[in-house]
Image (tube, rainbow, N blue to C red):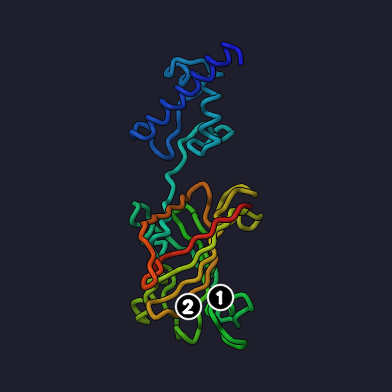
Amino acid sequence: MSENESDLGRAAQETRTRILSQISSGVLRPGQKLGAERDLAIEMQVSRSTLRQALTVLEETGVVKRLPGRGGGTFVSPEKIDRDLSQIVGVPSLLRGQGFTAGTRLISAAVLPADPKTQRALGLQDGDHIFDVVRIRLADGVPISLEHARFPADMFPGLLERPLGNSLYELLSKHYETTPDEAVEHIDLVNATVDEARILEVPIGSPLLSVTRTTMDTKGRKIEYSHDLFRGDRTRITVRTKSRPATSEQPGQRGRTVELKDV
């Protein structure tokens, strides 16, 4: 690497650091548009090529988003939703707890015979039925996840006659005295199909977090089998782990099992 290339790399790194500092301090806020390249380069006292190099790295790491066209430019990426796997909470409670306005669009709700995969997940038999609910979850009016949940029909009679726009966990607790206690989740990274991209308002092929979950209640019954797709650009997964030595009497702390798979 030549001396000029080395100097350019250091200048770009310093520029990235300054922009990151402005974002972390609140000078630049999520969704805010940065100035034009020429003005921003003057403000940072760097060349436009150095600025472009810094912005390219920030875009690759998801810190900023550059949009083409007359209304385009460089924007600070929207704040990500923190999905904490240490807690079993409905999406509305999750969003409200982080300062977002939660919303729901109900796509479908039906009584269906349990398919083989759902039978295995929920321990059902041939001929058993499920409540099948598909919804879009919104944060500040923007789609952030596509949710497909299934519940044993015999366990929750009349479920589909109740309001399905808020947390189903809260609904189960209120009307059926059923509280989620443990969940096993499998997480994959997938690319958005044409339909998924249209529903979640992202480009085709965008990364999505695919979460398949089986939930048990305090009585150890399997009450939910679901598949959720979260926008990768708006979601961050958090796992909190506390070490505790296992013994023969206490094999380990109950909690949520998370399995990460490569694409």
- Classify residue 168 by image quadrant: bottom left
Screen quadrant of the N terminus:
top right
Secondary element at tag 1: helix
Residue closer to the observer: 217 or 235: 217
Out of 150 and 85, give the one closest to the viewer: 85
Dots 1, 2 in contact, CB < 8 A? yes
Which disc, if any, is residue 121? 1
Q: Is residue 74 left or right of residue 18?
A: right
Outermost residue toward the front in this view: 248
Q: How far separated are the C-alphas under marks 1 and 2?
A: 8 Å
- Identified at 44% across, 54% down, the residue is 141
Residue where numbered disc 2 is placed: 222
* Outermost top residue: 3
**Image point 45% across, 80% down: which residue?**
221
Image height check: is 242 above or below 180? Answer: above
Q: Nearer the viewer, residue 131 or 31?
A: 131
Q: How far across and down, in percent of the image, does residue 23 sit?
A: 39, 33
Q: Which mark is residue 85?
A: none
Q: Look at label 1 and name its amino acid.
A: Ala
Compared across the picture, whether 11 is left or right of 127 comes to left
Residue 223, compared with residue 200, is above or below; it is below
Residue type, numbered disc 2: Lys
Earlier-in-chain disc, 1 versus 2: 1
Classify 10 Å Cα crowding around label 2: few (below 14), some (14-19), many (20 and above): many
Q: In this view, does 212 lie to the left or right of 15?
A: right
Q: Does dot 2 land on a helix, a strand or a loop?
A: strand
